[in-house]
């Protein structure tokens, strides 16, 4: 211990404060800062501090004369220009998120929530059975998205089926037959006290009536085909 203390006393204080055997001094003469983690330039092979390691900072002629290569997007294979002094990863990330066409096509979460202020999107559409708007999993219930404030009454399955039938192209005879069937069904529901029934009961009765009419139509077509076959004569 005494020998180590005597050795420290004989060592100059200025050299002890700078630790000359650790790190390297910056290659810029006006800086000459002692850096314990110096950065070695890949062109001139000199060591520099954190402020002068770029080509522009220490005016590296070899580095500035290198060919500036523009990276290509791995998705759309288009060149992504990068400003000098900026990392290419930043420009590439901004291109993929905003300007890449392939990235836009590959986005699968397209079903946005209809609640104001909610930016969530789902993989599959989640439609409310009452207001028929699309919502995320968090706002899928009626009490979560304030369904009563949307205005309008809830559409039943019968109304949706009627709208779908009205959009289908059909002939005048088929339209008249369909209108007559709808009027007949409405009268039957009114006579049977359908005003006090629930939407589920109305849907059930409507489905039964439609199935009955469809079965009667098929029977009529079968009977017509058999009668036409029996009237054939052999000459």
Image (cartoon, rainbow, N blue to C red):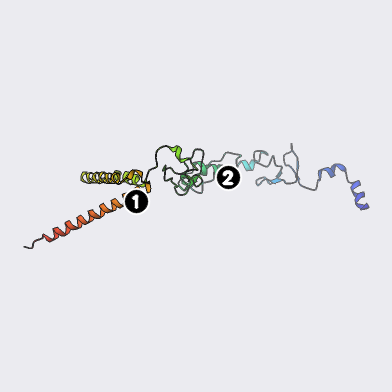
| Residue placed under numbered mark 2 in the picture | 89
Residue furthest to the left: 235
Residue located 42% across and 37% down the image: 151
Say which quarter of the image contains residue 221: bottom left
Indicate left or right for 30 with 76 as reference. right
| Residue placed under numbered mark 1 in the picture | 204
Mark 1: few/some/many CA within 10 Å (<14, 14-19, 20+): some
Q: Position of residue 46 (x, y in %)?
A: 70, 45
Query: Which is nearer the eye, 53 or 42?
Result: 53
Q: Nearer the viewer, mark 2 or mark 1?
A: 1
Q: Position of residue 116 (x, y in %)?
A: 49, 38
| Circle 1 SS class | helix
What is the number of callouts on the image? 2
Residue furthest to the bottom: 234
Task: Give the spatial CA distance, label 2 vs label 1.
Answer: 60 Å
| Circle 2 SS class | helix
């Amino acid at each position: 211990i005494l020998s180590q203390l005597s050795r420290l006393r004989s060592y100059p204080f200025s050299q002890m404060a700078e630790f000359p055997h650790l790190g390297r001094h910056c290659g810029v003469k006006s800086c000459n800062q002692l850096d314990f983690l110096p950065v070695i330039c890949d062109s001139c092979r000199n060591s520099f501090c954190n402020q002068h390691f770029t080509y522009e900072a220490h005016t590296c002629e070899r580095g500035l004369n290198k060919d500036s290569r523009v990276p290509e997007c791995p998705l759309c294979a288009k060149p992504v220009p990068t400003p000098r002094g900026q990392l290419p990863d930043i420009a590439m990330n901004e291109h993929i998120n905003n300007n890449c066409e392939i990235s836009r096509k590959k986005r699968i979460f397209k079903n946005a929530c209809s609640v104001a202020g909610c930016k969530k999107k789902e993989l599959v559409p989640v439609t409310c059975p009452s207001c028929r708007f699309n919502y995320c999993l968090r706002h899928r219930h009626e009490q979560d998205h304030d369904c009563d404030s949307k205005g309008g009454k809830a559409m039943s399955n019968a109304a949706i089926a009627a709208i779908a039938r009205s959009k289908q192209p059909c002939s005048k005879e088929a339209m008249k037959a369909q209108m007559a069937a709808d009027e007949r069904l409405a009268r039957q529901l009114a006579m049977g006290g359908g005003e006090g029934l629930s939407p589920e009961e109305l849907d059930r009765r409507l489905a039964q009536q439609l199935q009955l009419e469809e079965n009667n139509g098929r029977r009529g077509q079968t009977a017509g085909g058999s009668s036409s076959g029996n009237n054939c004569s052999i000459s």
